[in-house]
Amino acid sequence: MFKIVLICAVIGMAAAVGIVVSDESKAEVLSRKEDVRPDGFEALLETSNSIIRKESGDEKGNIQGVFSWVSPEGEKIEVSYVADENGYQPKSDSLPTPPPIPDEIERALKWIAANPPAPDSKN
């Protein structure tokens, strides 16, 4: 249940950002389908301002889905995700990524892994 609330909050915040930037408060729901079953659920929401949300889940609380919207710059932003026992795992070309690890650091990490410290001889 917490995962569903968290995902709805993220989608709500994404939609709220669009409302603040422009007057999208007049957007209409074009399509909305929700199918809740004992073995899971499926949901779909599509609005006139190009916000789309599709998700499905099973009885164990595992959820997978995708949501998208058009940014103020006119770029379509799409995020797919899985929420399961490993947590929330979003994937998108629009998400920031960490910079590459410098070669020196990577070499040092490999050396440390290959040369573990000697056991403490005091014990």
Image (spheres, helix red, strand yellow):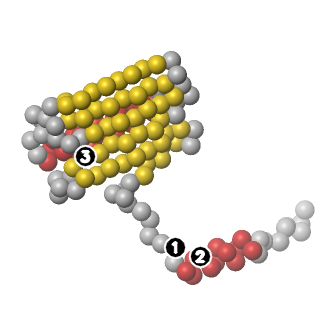
Say which label, 2 or 3, has the lower sequence index: 3
Tag 3's secondary structure? strand
The residue under the point 41% across, 28% down is 42
Amino acid type at mark 1: Ile
Q: Which callout, 1 or 3, points to the residue nearer the camera?
A: 3
Residue at mark 2 to residue at mark 1: CA–CA distance: 6 Å
Tag of residue 69 = 3
Q: Where does residue 85 sit, x and y in percent of width and height?
A: 57, 38
At label 2, counting other C-alpha atoms closer than 10 Å, the crowd grade (few under 14, some 14-19, many 20 or more) is: few
Tag 2's secondary structure? helix
Amino acid type at mark 3: Trp
Tag of residue 101 = 1
Q: Where does residue 122 sit, x and y in percent of width and height?
A: 89, 66
At label 1, counting other C-alpha atoms closer than 10 Å, the crowd grade (few under 14, some 14-19, many 20 or more) is: few
Residue 18, image quadrant: top left
Say which label, 1 or 3, has the lower sequence index: 3
The residue under the point 15% across, 31% down is 28
Q: Identify residue for label 2.
A: 106
Residue 121, image quadrant: bottom right
Residue 96, image quadrant: bottom left
Q: Foreground: 35 or 88?
A: 35
In the image, 114: left or right of 81? right
Say which label, 2 or 1, has the lower sequence index: 1
Q: Where does residue 29 sit, x and y in percent of width and height?
A: 19, 30
Q: Which callout, 2 or 3, points to the residue nearer the camera?
A: 3
Residue at mark 1 to residue at mark 3: CA–CA distance: 32 Å
Pointers 2 and 1 in contact (C-beta within 8 Å): yes
Residue at mark 2 to residue at mark 3: CA–CA distance: 38 Å
Pointers 1 and 3 in contact (C-beta within 8 Å): no
In the image, 122: left or right of 32? right
